[in-house]
Image: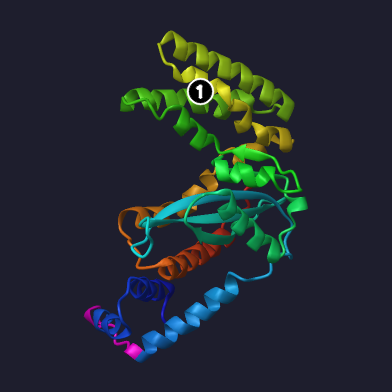
């Protein structure tokens, strides 16, 4: 039986447009004697499994939080030359998490996000039980959540918010220092032992401190920092336990596992069509879920 790395290699070659015969020849260079027929059979079995896996029933677990993200990929077969992979990671009350699903779209519009959420609902996700959605705060996502019957709070990813606040700072050292100021607001030890209401009060005071420091240094970013900061601390209003809330302050839990996938898609891959994107994305996300199962719960100390 071929190991998962070899299957992934064959799959990556296949979705790049390489024939079964050529794949077999490439593998022979690696001293792997696998015939074109075997390559074909393995890929067909894998595709059937992936189709079943990404259609699996999701009603068995009590998901309470959703972390959503959009990743742009190169697509030679589309007019714009790129597609966006919208994905959702579910988190249960006990802190278990897994990639629930994804969809490939032309944009991050309201309709695109609707396609993702409706696919999750069809597979058993009960949106009435979702207490919080964590995302980058794109206009399409906000519009979708605004127009659905169930009102679900949106936690704007703290990291993405900080990036947007400081995106016009050109000097790298200055930006690093300002990022340190920014994350001091929510990550310092003086927030430990406080309840959520006290945390919110403390954070707001610290926002004022950092804003004043930036103003004194002649930085206009202080206005950006204060303008929509309430959207960044929604999680502390929804989750009473601050230690849990901090775990959902950003999408970093998702980003950490998607990092290698993103780097490959951004820098190395240019797919022939949407089908190729779908095949490889499904395989990579499946692998991420296997790794997540071996990890302790998100709330693990």
| Residue 198 falls left or right of residue 206 | right
**Left or right of 109 in this view: 125:** right
Name the one closer to the observer, 300 or 204. 204
Quadrant where the C terminus sits is top right
- Label 1 crowd (10 A; few <14 / some 14-19 / many >=20): some
Return the residue nearer the eye: 60 or 274.
274
Front-lying residue, 267 or 79: 79
User: Position of 184 compared to 123: left or right?
Assistant: left
- The percent position of residue 101, horizontal first and vertical second, equals 58, 61
Name the residue at the top extreme.
216
The secondary structure type at the circle numbered 1 is helix
Q: Measured along the vertical axis of the image, is residue 88 above or below residue 163?
A: below
Q: Which residues are magenta?
A: 28-36
Identify whether 58 is placed above or below 25: above
Residue 154 screen position, x and y as percent: 65, 40
The answer to whether residue 169 shows anywhere in this view is yes
Where is 147 relative to 261, above or below? Answer: above
Q: Residue at x 71, y 60 (%)?
A: 125
- Residue bearing the label numbered 1: 224
**Image point 47% across, 22% down: which residue?**
181
**Which image quarter holds the N terminus?**
bottom left
Residue drawn at x 62%, y 71% is 55
Q: Quadrant of residue 268?
A: bottom left
Magenta span contains residue 31: yes
Question: Residue 126 placed where, x, y %?
Answer: 75, 57
Q: Is residue 95 magenta?
A: no
Give percent across and percent down for residue 288: 51, 61
Q: Main secondary structure of the magenta part?
A: loop
Residue placed at 44% from the left, 16% from the top? 220
Residue 195 seen in this snapshot: no
Image quarter of residue 143: top right
Work out which residue is located at the far left of the displayed protein and give it.
29
């Amino acid at each position: 039986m071929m190991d998962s790395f070899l299957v992934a290699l064959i799959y990556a070659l296949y979705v790049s447009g390489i024939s079964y015969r050529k794949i077999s020849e490439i593998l022979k260079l690696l001293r792997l004697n696998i015939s074109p027929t075997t390559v074909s059979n393995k890929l067909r079995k894998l595709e059937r499994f992936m189709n079943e896996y990404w259609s699996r029933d999701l009603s068995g677990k009590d998901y309470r939080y959703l972390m959503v993200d959009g990743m742009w990929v190169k697509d030679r077969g589309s007019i714009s030359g790129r597609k966006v992979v919208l994905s959702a990671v579910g988190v249960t009350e006990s802190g278990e998490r897994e990639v629930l699903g994804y969809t490939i779209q032309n944009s991050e519009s309201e309709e695109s996000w609707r396609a993702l959420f409706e696919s999750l609902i069809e597979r058993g996700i009960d949106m009435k039980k979702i207490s919080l959605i964590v995302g980058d705060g794109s206009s399409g996502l906000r519009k979708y959540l605004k127009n659905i019957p169930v009102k679900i709070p949106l936690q704007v990813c703290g990291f993405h918010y900080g990036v947007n606040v400081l995106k016009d700072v050109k000097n790298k050292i200055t930006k690093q220092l300002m990022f340190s100021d920014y994350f001091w607001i929510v990550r310092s030890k003086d927030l430990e032992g406080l309840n959520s209401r006290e945390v919110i009060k403390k954070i707001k005071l610290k926002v004022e401190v950092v804003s004043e420091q930036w103003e004194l240094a002649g930085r206009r970013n202080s206005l950006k920092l204060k303008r929509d900061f309430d959207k960044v601390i929604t999680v502390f209003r929804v989750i009473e336990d601050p230690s849990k809330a901090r775990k959902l302050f950003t999408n970093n839990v998702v980003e950490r596992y998607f990092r290698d996938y993103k780097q490959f898609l951004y820098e190395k891959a240019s797919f022939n069509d949407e089908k190729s994107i779908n095949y490889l994305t499904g395989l990579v996300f499946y692998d991420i879920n296997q790794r997540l199962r071996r990890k302790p719960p998100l709330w693990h100390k």
